[in-house]
Amino acid sequence: MNEKNNKYSGEMKPERNTTVEKEHDRRFEIQFTQNRSFELRIGRKTFLFGTGNRTHILNKKELDHPDFQQQARYFTVREV
């Protein structure tokens, strides 16, 4: 057999880094603390905060995004 075909078969399969995956799987509830409507954009995602919906669930990657970090002072964050 050729090495290319053998590379990912059986026991030669590379191990996945589960600690990094678990870190990104962590979820956080963010709550908007201001008494007004607000539109939060993180990359291409938009989260709307209004009178009816003041909380959203974000993952660790979204929480660490520079777009969120710029607006973080308006939110309380707790791990879910």
Image (cartoon, rainbow, N blue to C red):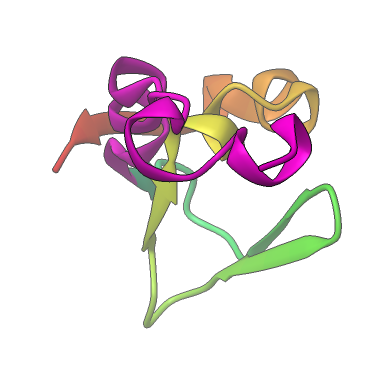
Residue beneath the point at 78% across and 21% down = 66
Residue 75 x/y as whole percent: 45, 33
- Identify the image quadrant of the N terminus: top right
Q: Residue at x 30, y 25 (%)?
A: 18
Query: In the depicted view, which residue is nearer to us: 11 or 43?
Result: 11
The spot of residue 77 in percent (x, y) is: 31, 30
Q: Is residue 49 above or below residue 70?
A: below
Extreme residue in the bottom direction? 52
Q: Is residue 65 above or below residue 10?
A: above
Q: Is residue 20 magenta?
A: yes
Span of residues in magenta: 1-29
**Direction front: furthest residue:** 1
Closer to the camera, 24 or 60?
24
Across and down, in percent, residue 58 comes to 44, 48
User: Which residue is drawn at the image coordinates 69% and 46% (left, top)?
Assistant: 5
Residue 46 pos. (x, y %): 73, 66
Give the total number of marks visible in the rendering: 0
The residue sitting at 85% across, 60% down in the picture is 44
